[in-house]
Each structure stands twice: as structure tokens, then as C-alpha cells.
Image: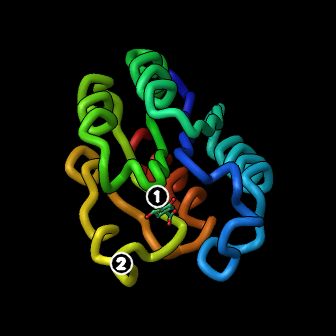
Amino acid sequence: MSNIILVLNGPNLNMLGLREPAVYGHETLADVEAMATRHGEGHGFAVECKQTNHEGQMIDWIHQARGRVAGIVINPGAWTHTSVAIHDALIACEVPVLEVHISNVHKRESFRHHSYVSLVAVGVIAGFGTQGYTLAIDRFATLLK
Ligand code: DQA
């Protein structure tokens, strides 16, 4: 079985560290990806990290994960609340999905309370800051081994 965990970040997450630090913290996406990669290696995973602001690109990466990766950790950003297409791609991919949000979306505006991705995710982590990514990798270590 593959030992690859794919960590996908959606729109505006390239702005981590600069964007609303009171909500998302001061770490950059590069910091988060390095942390996730190191953490995954500790569990024997090879972690691949990708970020895009383009929905079609995200869908292509999800399709390409089919049959190739063991698990997907995804922070879909605002697409969480809008994208039936990402929901459908994740189903088509047939890879277990863990959904991560840095902020506690349930404490925020009502439009953030619904997630199309949660309908297809094995689990959801929200409001644990960037630690959510390492918690998701820990969860995959339990689920996949
Ligand atoms: C987010 C929450 C979303 O509502 C928002 O659009 C984001 C980031 C989070 O990580 O808390 O871009 O997914």
C-alpha cells in the first residue's frame, strides 16, 4: 500500500502568516508544510504538499491521487462552503479524506457552518490552529496501520 499522504491547501492559504493573523496565526504555508512533512516522516509517511488558488487545478490533483496515495488531508479554504465539484472529486478519488480548518469555522459567520467536504470526509478538525495538520496525520497513522 502507498505510504503517501497528500496535504492539499485551497485558496488564500498561500497567504498564511500575512492574512488575518488574529484568525490564522503567524506561521507561513512553508512553515506548515515543513511541519507536516517532518511529522509525517516520523510516522513513516511520505508527505506531498500542494496549494492552489484555482479550483480546476485542485480537482485535477484530487483525481491524480486516486490509486496513488493512502490519504488526503485537505484544507479547502472557502471552497469548503461552495464547491460541489470538489465534493464530487473527493468521492471519485476513493481515498480517505480528513478535512482541516485552522480556525473554528463554527464560531464564525454562518456561511462557514456548512461544508460540502465534511459529507465525504472521514473526520474534521477545526479550531486547533496549524496543529490541525499534524493531528490529521496522527489520525491517518492510526487509521492506516
Ligand atoms: C479555513 C476556513 C474557511 O472558512 C476560510 O474560507 C479559509 C480558511 C480555515 O482554515 O480556517 O480560507 O478553511
Is label 1 in a helix, a strand or a loop? strand
Q: List x then y, in percent, for residue 60.
A: 45, 20
Within-10-Å neighbours for mark 2: few <14, some 14–19, many 20+:
few
Q: Residue at x 60, y 78 (%)?
A: 23
Question: Is the residue at mark 1 in contact range of ligand 1, meaning its CB lies under 8 Å from it?
Answer: yes
Location of mark 2 (residue):
109
Using the image as rendered, state which of residue 42 and residue 102 is in the foreground. Answer: 102
Q: Mark 1 or mark 2, which is nearer to you?
A: 2
Left-right relation of 26 to 104: right
Residue 100 seen: yes
Left-right relation of 34 to 6: right
Q: Amino acid at mark 1?
A: Val
Nearest to N terminus: mark 1 or mark 2: 1
Q: List x then y, in percent, for residue 144.
A: 41, 39
Location of residue 38 with respect to 48 vertically, above or below:
below
Location of mark 1 (residue):
100
Q: Residue at x 49, y 51 (%)?
A: 75
Please, which colouring scheme is shown?
A: rainbow
Task: Find the residue positioned furthest to the left.
Answer: 119
Q: Residue at x 65, y 45 (%)?
A: 40
Q: Residue at x 36, y 60 (%)?
A: 124
Q: CA distance from mark 1 to mark 2?
A: 17 Å
Q: Amino acid at mark 2?
A: Glu
